[in-house]
Amino acid sequence: MMGFADILDDEEISAVVDFVLTTFVKNKGENTRYHIPENGWENHQQYAIAFPFARGEIKLDTPWEALTPEQRRGKTLFMTSCITCHDRARVDQEGAAWESRPVSIPRGAYSHRKDEQQEDVVTGATPYARHEIAPVIENLTAQERRGEQLYQDNCAFCHAADGSGKNWIGSFLEPHPRNLTDRQFISVMDRQKLLVAISDGLPDTTMPAWKSVLNSEDIEALAAYVEKAFFGPR
Ligand code: HEC
Ligand code: HEC
C-alpha cells in the first residue's frame, strides 16, 4: 500500500475516508461502480469485448483456437489494458496467466488531451493524468508564449504540465520537483530568485542548471511564464 500524501490533498483524503466509512462500514455496500468518467473512464462500454474476461465468464487460459475472432480481440485488449487491475480473472490452471512487465506512464500513443485519441485506458485512469494538462491562459505576451513552449518541452517532464510536480515522473524523484503552485514557495520567490534557480539549478537534486542549455533570453521567458501560469495574483 503506497502513501497517497503526494497524490491527494487533505480534503480529498478525508473525502475518501468519508466515502469508505459510509459506503462500506456503515451501509455494508458490496462494491461501487469504478468504471465511471470521474475515475477517468469515459464510455466504459467501448471495452465491452473484454468484459467476459473481466467478469470471469471466459477463462483466461481458454486455448486461443477455441476463441472466436471477437473473443480474441477481447482477450488482447484485456491483456494489455485491464489485467493490471483485474489480475484475479478466472483460470483453469492455477499459476501466472500473464507475464508482468514494468508500466511507464504515459504509454504508447496515449494523449491526456480529450480531443486526441485515448487508446491506453490504464494511462487515462491514472491519478497522475490530471497533472499532465497545461493551464489554458489567454493573453500571453510573446515572451510568455515562448516561455510556455520552453516550459512544456523541458520542465513539464519533471514539474508536471500544471506545475504541481505531482505527475508520474515527479512523484518518483527525491526530492520531488518543486510544486511551482505552492503558496509557501511563491511567497518567498521573486523574479531574480527564479532566474538564478533556473540558470544554476539546485545542488543535490535533479534540478538541472539550464544556463548551459538555454540562453538568457530563454531563461527570462521561462521565468515570465512560470510567474504568469503558476504564481497567480500575489
Ligand atoms: C485501474 C484499475 C482497473 C483497470 C485498469 C480496469 N478495471 Fe475493471 N474494475 C476495476 C474495479 C476496482 C472494479 C470493481 C468495482 C466495480 O464493480 O465497479 C472493476 C470492475 C469491472 C467490471 C465489472 C463491473 C462493471 O463495470 O461491469 C468489468 C466488466 C470491468 N471492470 C471491465 C474492465 C475492462 C474491460 C478493463 C480494460 C479495458 C478494465 N476493467 C480495467 C478496476 C479496473
Ligand atoms: C529532471 C527533473 C527536473 C527538470 C527537467 C526541471 N526541474 Fe526544476 N526542480 C527539480 C527538482 C528536483 C527541484 C528541487 C526540489 C527541492 O529542492 O525540493 C526543482 C526546483 C525548481 C525550482 C525551485 C527553485 C528554488 O529555489 O526553490 C524552480 C523555480 C524550478 N525547479 C524550475 C524549473 C524550470 C523552469 C525547469 C525547466 C527549464 C525545470 N525546473 C526543470 C527537478 C527538475
Image (cartoon, grey):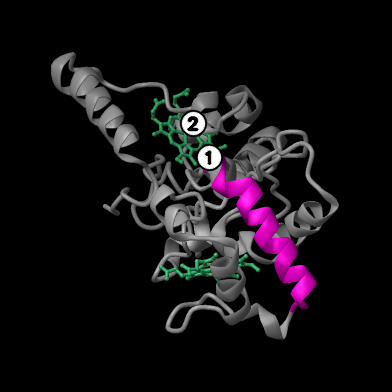
Q: From where the camera sits, is residue 76 visible?
A: yes
Q: Which residue is nearer to you in this view: 88 or 119?
A: 119
Residue 58 position, x and y percent, is 49, 34
Q: Is disc 1's CB within 8 Å of ligand 1?
A: yes
Label 1 Cα neighbours within 10 Å, binned few <14 / some 14-19 / many ≥20 = some
Separation of residues labelled 1 and 2 (CA atoms): 6 Å
**Which residue is situated farthest in the left direction here?**
26
Q: Earlier in the sequence, mark 1 or mark 2?
A: 2
- Is label 1 in contact with label 2 (beta carbons under 8 Å)? yes
Residue 130 position, x and y percent, is 55, 41
Question: 147 above or below 53?
Answer: below
Residue at (54%, 61%) from the top-left corner?
Answer: 190
Q: Amino acid at mark 2?
A: Asn
Identify the residue under disc 2: 39
97 sits left or right of 110 in the view: left
SS type, badge 2: helix
Identify the residue under disc 1: 125
Residue 231 position, x and y percent, is 55, 48
Look at the image and say whether residue 116 sits in the magenta stretch: no
* Range shown magenta: 214-234
Residue 33 position, x and y percent, is 41, 22
